[in-house]
Image (cartoon, rainbow, N blue to C red):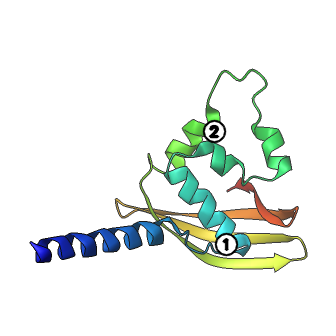
């Protein structure tokens, strides 16, 4: 009986430790490359609002739909991620200059295909923000 209680107590401690360590957020990659990876991570999870938050003010100005009737961004995001099937975003190169950067990267999908992309970023309030992806 005592062994059973001891094992249950140990299991509860291990479970609690796992829960606490799982809640601690992993350090995020900083800089322009980190912003690009974070953008695609949010897109791939279907967090379109979170992804849009990583756009520059200028880019957001073009994305705003005055009628609010269509989800052009959502359609683009589903196509860009092949319906949330991004496996990895590999940064090929980053060119940083004061307050701006260009990142070339490859998006790899679970079906084995990939596409090369490029984006210019700017710093706004200390954070890297994306322009339009080409």
Q: In this view, does 49 lie above or below 65?
A: below
Quarter of the image for the N terminus: give it. Answer: bottom left
Q: Which mark is residue 33?
A: 1
Observer-nearest residue: 107 or 13? 13
**Residue 127 percent across, percent down from the top left:** 80, 64
Residue displayed at 66% across by 79% down: 93
Residue displayed at 61% across by 30% down: 71
Say what secondary structure mark 1 lies in. helix
- Within 10 Å of disc 1 (Cα), the crowding (few <14, some 14-19, many 20+) is many
Left/right placement of residue 59 relative to residue 99 reads: left
Say what secondary structure mark 2 lies in. helix
**Residue 63 percent across, percent down from the top left:** 75, 39
Q: Is residue 42 above or below residue 122?
A: above
Q: How many marks?
A: 2
- Within 10 Å of disc 2 (Cα), the crowding (few <14, some 14-19, many 20+) is some
**Between discs 1 and 2, the one toward the N terminus:** 1
**Residue 15 percent across, percent down from the top left:** 33, 68
Quarter of the image for the C terminus: give it. Answer: bottom right
Q: Which mark is residue 73?
A: 2
**Residue 25 percent across, percent down from the top left:** 56, 68
Q: Residue furthest right?
A: 98
Q: Residue furthest left?
A: 1
Left/right placement of residue 63 relative to residue 19 reads: right
């Amino acid at each position: 009986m005592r062994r059973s209680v001891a094992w249950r107590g140990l299991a509860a401690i291990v479970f609690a430790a796992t829960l606490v360590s799982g809640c601690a957020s992993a350090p995020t990659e900083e800089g322009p490359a980190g912003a690009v990876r974070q953008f695609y991570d949010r897109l791939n999870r279907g967090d379109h609002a979170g992804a849009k938050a990583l756009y520059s003010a200028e880019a957001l100005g073009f994305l705003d739909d005055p009628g609010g009737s269509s989800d052009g961004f959502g359609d683009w995001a589903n196509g860009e991620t092949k319906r949330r099937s991004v496996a990895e975003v590999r940064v090929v190169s980053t060119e940083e200059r004061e307050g701006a950067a260009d990142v070339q990267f490859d998006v790899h999908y679970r079906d084995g295909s990939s596409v090369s992309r490029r984006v210019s970023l700017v710093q706004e309030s200390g954070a890297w923000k994306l322009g339009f992806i080409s």
